[in-house]
Each structure stands twice: as structure tokens, then as C-alpha cells.
Amino acid sequence: MEKFLQYKNVSYFYQTKESEIHALNKIDFSIAEKDFASIVGPSGCGKTTMLSLTAGLLEPSTGEILLKGKKIEKNDSRIGYMFQRDHLFEWRTIWQNIILGLEIQKKHKDEKTLCFADQLLKKYDLYNFKNKKPRQLSGGMRQRVALIRTLVLNPTLLLLDEPFSALDFQTRLNVCDDVYQIIKSEKKTALLVTHDISEALSMSDKIFILSSRPATVRKQLEISFEGDTPLKKREDKNFGKYFELIWRNLS
Amino acid sequence: MKNKQINYSKTHAKYLKKLKTEKLIVIFWQIVVIVGFLGLWELLATTGAIDPFFFSSPSRIVTTIIDLGRSGNLFIHIWTSLYETILGFTIATILGVFIAILLWWSERLRKVMEPYLIVINSLPKIALGPMIILWVGSGVSATIVMCVLICLVITIISMLNAFISCDSDKILLMKSMHANKFQILFKLILPNALPDFISVLKINVGMSWVGTIMGEYLSSKAGLGYLINYGSQMLQLDVVMASIVLLCILAGGMYFIVSPFEKKYKKG
């Protein structure tokens, strides 16, 4: 298996006034291209820290993180980040929100990229809302816009930080399905962080279970179901078994 | 209009009618309050229950305004005050936002300046009046400086709060897209603070009039504040009251110029 994203012996300490906190302890793992991997762990174990490290927003205290064999730089442009909330800018239209990253990187006059953005909007049923303001859209649609905003920058690796936690349960299942299918059809590699076991199970090919602080990878699971969408996977007869296995490893 | 109403269901039409009736009732009572107040005042003054020499009366105020208008002085006074207020308001708003941006930009500068901002904010700016007159001379310029001083600090503090209260995840999002600090400022911080800016404008309308009138009390040769001061010293309460009425109209007018912006931008 070719290593696409690789954590090599990564530790991370962060400083507070009172003490130095050992957040991550010698983390070692790797994922392959086009994998959908999830990291689950008890709350406060440093999952979000891992995403920040992977995005290059933080630097590991020891060890290194490689993406396609190349060390991750500060604010690495190969990485797309999706947050817990959609963070769409209310004063911008959907279209203006989508090209925000392009504007920042001065690519908003590039015909090809704009065409790509247009295509994504059409493909994922948002084209008619192009000139609407975010508040006119439902929570699920907003999250889809947020994903497209990340995708137009054509990232090599997508990081998802509990992207559905702000949605109500019903919407959550649907958006989870949508996002999964978008990511799969755009052939992206994704790393999801969540504390929701069933969410991780229904989306991932691979799950890493973290221990509590200082976090290490306690267990690594390869998941395979017959169904090919999160909703169908949830109905699989093995779903419960996996769930139980992860749950036991978490507590 | 009528075509549109056909689409409404009966209950909805009823609801809309109720809303409309409620609005009319409020307007009706607003008129009752002002007419009643003026009527009572006039009645008490003419019957001698209150002394019109000290309390003036609506009719005497109107006559005074007309007299002042005929002599041509009225417009000089109004123009002077309006000029001072608008200039002070504009300078304070622009300068205040600019300083707030600088303080947002440098966290260290912000920490250094924090205690001073707090002290200057709690200082009654009128205390600086005599010094202002010595430094910039009496008259229009002193009034404008007073006006700027009163609006400036509150503008800085309000805008700075708006800037730093911006969601840190939104900043992280901008950073993850490689935005530099200028881009974060212009694409996120400033548009995000627009509703707060509108509130500041509204507060500054009131504050700038306070500054102008205070400045004119201190030293002036023209303006509504001068007129009020002059009127009270000459015991011409009609002049004082007339100036206050004009002040109400001007300040209210300025407020109504600002408020449509609020409706437009606060929705988001």
C-alpha cells in the first residue's frame, strides 16, 4: 500500500499558563490515496489538534507528517479544511462564498477554475441558489456549499472536523450521505474527526481509535460493508458488531 | 395590491388586518401624545396656570422661530451647529474606525493601550474644554474638537470589540485558504462588523450633538448651543425653547438619515 498521508512518531505538547500539556504521544499511522479514514476518540483527547497539525496550522513537537512523501508546510495548499459549522459569510451570495478561496488565492479570474465551480454547483443541485444569501438555505444545503467552497481549491486531502455536529439528526443523516457521495465522486482522500461512532462507521474505510490524553493510536480497523452509501451501511448486519468493538476500545 | 390579496387565506388576511390595525392604533396614540402635550402646554400658558415667561408656550415658540428666521440669524445658528456636528461626526467616525483597525492589527499595541483607553473613556471630556480653547482657540474649531473627542473613544471601543469578537473559526477558515492579514481584514473582519458600525453611527449621531452643544456652551459666537446659552442669560426663555425644538428636529433628522442603513444591513 502506498502511503498517502503518513504520521511518523508524532508527539505534540501545548503550553498553558499552568502547565505543559502532552496532547499526542508518538502517533504512527498512514492512509492510502482515496481512503476515507476516521479518527475517533474520547472527547478532549486531541482529535482537533491532529487536524490542525495535518492542516499545517500547528507544527508537531517531535516527529513528522508527510503528505505524498513531502513534509506538510505551514498552511499547506494541498489541504482543504471543513469545520463543524459551515461558516458561510452572510454578506456574500452563495456564489461569492464559493469563490472566496479563489479570490484569496487570486484565481477568481481564471476561466477554468470558475467553470469547475459552476460545474460543482450544477452537479450538486445548488445552481439555482447561486445568487441567494446563505440564510435562505437549509442547514444541509449550507454544509454542501461549505464543502464545495473547499473543493474548488482542488485540495489533495480533505480534513473534516465533525462537520455534521451542528445539524439536527434527520438532516445529519442526509447531509452525511451527500457529503460522502460528493467526496467519493470527486475521488478525494478524506480524514474525518468525530466522537460519533456510527458516523465514523458509516463513512469510513478505515478507523483509528485514539486513547485518552496523551493520545496514541489504540486500535486500527479496516471497515468493509456491502452497502456503498452511509445510509445503507447503517443497515448492514455487521454494523452493530463494529460499533460494539469500537465502543469497547474507547472506554 | 388587490390582486396580491386574493392569494391570502382568510385567516392570513385577518392576521394582516390585525397587524395593520395595531400599527394605526400606535400612530394614533403617538399623535394624541404630541397634540395633547402641546395643547395642554398652550392652555396652561394662556390661562396663566404656568408663567409663559419662564415656561414659554407652543405659540410663542413658533413666533420666536419665525422672528429669528426673518432676521436671518436663525440660519447662521442652524448652519453653524449642523456644520460642527457633521464635521465632528465624520472625523470621529473615520478616525475611530482607523484606530480600531490599528489596535486589531497589533495585539501588543492593543494590550499596551487598553488601560489608557479605559481611563480616557471614563473621563468626562468636558473637563478638557478650557484646554481645548487654549490650544485651538475658541469658536467653531474648539467645538469640533470637543465633538470629535466625545465620539472618538466610544467609536474606537465599539469597533474594536466588534473586530475582535469575530468567530475565531472563521479566521481559521481564512487562514486555511492562505489569506494574509489584509485579506482577513477586508474580506472578513470589516464586512462582519458592518452591523456594529451602523450601531456606532446611530450612537454617534446623539454623541456628536452632545459634543457640539457642550462646545458651544463653552465658547462660541453662533450655533444653537450659543442661542440657548444667550437666551437663558437674557432670560428669553422663548429663544431657549425654540432652539431646543430646532435641535430636536435636526438630531431626529440625522437619525432618520442613518436608520435606513440599519434596516438594510442588520437583516443579515
Image (cartoon, grey):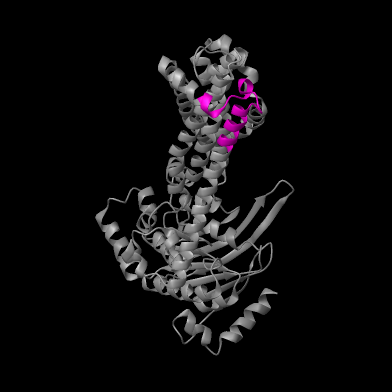
User: Does residue B175 appear to the left or right of A114 in the view shown?
Assistant: right
In reply to whether residue B44 is colored magenta, the answer given is yes
- Eyeballing the image, is A123 above or below A134? below
The answer to which of A245 and B57 lies nearer the viewer is B57
Where in the figure is residue B209, as x and y percent of width and height? 53, 27
Q: Position of residue B161 (x, y in %)?
A: 58, 41
> Start and end of the magenta stretch?
B37-61
- The quadrant of the rendering that contains the N terminus of chain B is bottom left
Q: Nearer the viewer, residue A222 or B105?
A: B105
Residue A2 on the magenta span: no
Residue A93 appearing in the image: yes
- Residue A182 vertical placement versus B226 (above, below): below
Q: Residue furthest right?
A: A18
Q: Residue A181 in the image: x percent, y percent?
A: 41, 74
Residue A68 seen by the camera: no
Look at the picture and state if B235 lies above or below A188. Answer: above
Query: Within the image, what quadrant is residue B216 found in?
Result: top right
* x 54%, y 32%: residue: B206
Specify the farthest residue to the front: B47
Magenta residues, dominant SS class: helix
Q: Nearer the viewer, residue B200 or A101?
A: B200
Measured as percent of width and height from the top left, residue B163 is found at 53, 42
Residue under the point 49% across and 27% down: B246
Residue furthest bottom in the image: A237
Residue that appears at 60% across and 86% down: A241
The quadrant where residue A99 appears: bottom left
Asked whether B159 or A200 is in front, the reply is B159
Residue under the point 52% across and 80% down: A223
* For residue B124, side relative to residue B138 (left or right): right
